[in-house]
Image (cartoon, rainbow, N blue to C red):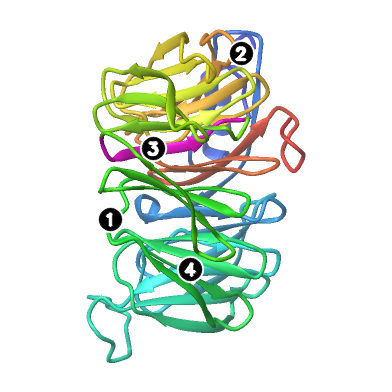
Amino acid sequence: MFNLQKPFAVNSITVFILVTIFFQTVYSQKAVADLPLFNHCWFYPTESANNIEIASDNDSFLYLSLSDGKLISIDSKTGEKYWETELIGNIISSPLTDPENIFIITNSSGSPNSRENLPDSSNTLHCLSKSTGIILWQHRLSTTGKVFLYNSENFITLINANGDAFSIAKNDGRLGWKTRLGTQISALPFKKKNEIILGTADQRVTILSLVSGKSIGSFEISMPAKVIIEDTTGSSLIIGNKKGILWSLNKKKKTRNWSFRFGAEISSLTLTAQGLLVSSLDNFVYLMSEKSGKIIWKSRLPGRIAAQPQLGNNYFIITSVDESEALVIELSSGRLVNKIVLGEENFFTGESTQTKSLFVYNTKKGILGFAQAGGCGKLVK
């Protein structure tokens, strides 16, 4: 690739040849500081990029799910397709991987590729081999709507938007425990070890055991949570609501440690070594102390933040909806230190993931994999 952080010393013909060879897309960096530098690793073109969700086994493969029922495995080192499986129905969950298998949920309602006489809005959990894409077993679910999947040792836990939670055995699809919360989920469930933390529409935060499905903690709050994480000590929950109020809740005392109000709804929370990274729908990203709630710095983005920030070595990468630039921002200062720029008529569409070696982003024209300079196929520190 050509690097715009070095002096421009090639003529227009050479640039044209380089761009043409480069997968019919342009990937470059704009000079802002000395580092970090990035290498383009691969580009996987697809016409359905807006519908893709990405999962990783943090080792060799990425799994792309398209809403029309296609599940694709690609080599994370080369970006080449390994296998493709077409499932019956529309995919309604992100793929979930364990060491041997991959799990995903489809819905049969209105599916053009459904060849069975299934009930309206019927959900099916599929277990596939990671190495071949062959379906090992399927389990018809009684639940409908969006479903979240989470790993535990021998079971997977499923939670739907209506507050139904249950476990299914990985080896044969046998139903385990089942818990009904009786209210809708208001925040993306947060998993830590063998627990899952849920915000619900009845203004509560509940902690469920993934082993038994039983509640091991419950907290009343003043407004339904939109985002939840646990702090690095495990002693407090950090909760944000629709009005942009963020607070730290002591789990033992059930009291607030601190609170802060942002200019708009909070879209994501990320724990870093330097503090709590907060993305807001006011188009700002903030670093704050998770201990005191004080703002360390804030940085404005050109548009609405598209996906959760991805962390590197004292920097993070963040994108805005329909923008062609990914911003590389220094964690300690909030200073812009680089930009990763897509080519003409291409932009970031939201979904992203991070593996041991790669930053992987969804774009209008396909999936882009890149790493810190020299890092393709190696560990990103």
Of pointers 2 and 1, the one earlier in the residue sequence = 2
Which element type, helix, strand or loop, lies under badge 1?
A: loop
Estimate how packed mark 4 is, as few (under 14), some (14 to 19) or many (20 or more) residues with alpha carbons within 10 Å. Answer: many
The boundaries of the magenta stretch are: 223-232
The residue that mark 3 highlights is 227
Residue 135 in view: yes
- Compute the Cα span from label 2 to label 1: 50 Å
- What's the residue type where badge 4 is placed? Ile
Q: Position of residue 282 (x, y in %)?
A: 28, 21
Q: Earlier in the sequence, mark 4 or mark 1?
A: 4
The residue wearing badge 4 is: 104
Of discs 4 and 1, which sits in the foreground?
Answer: 1
- Amino acid type of the residue tagged 2 in the rendering: Gln
Q: Does residue 67 lie above or below 54 as drawn? A: below
Of the two numbered discs 3 and 1 in the rendering, the one whose residue sits closer to the viewer: 1
Which structural element holds mark 2? loop
Q: Which residue is mark 2?
A: 5
Decide if residue 44 is on the left or right side of residue 3: left
* Vertical order, 144 against 358 (above or below): below
Q: Nearer the viewer, mark 2 or mark 4?
A: 4
Which quadrant is the N terminus positioned in? Answer: top right
> Is residue 343 in view?
no
State the residue position of label 1. Answer: 184
In the image, residue 147 sits, relative to residue 167, either above or below, namely above
Amino acid of disc 3: Val
The picture places residue 270, in percent across and down from the top left corner, at 51, 30
Residue shown at 71% from the left, 55% from the top: 60
Estimate how packed mark 3 is, as few (under 14), some (14 to 19) or many (20 or more) residues with alpha carbons within 10 Å.
many
Q: Earlier in the sequence, mark 3 or mark 4?
A: 4
CA distance separating discs 2 and 4: 42 Å
Depth check, mark 2 against mark 3: the one in front is 3
> Residue 110, percent across and down?
22, 75
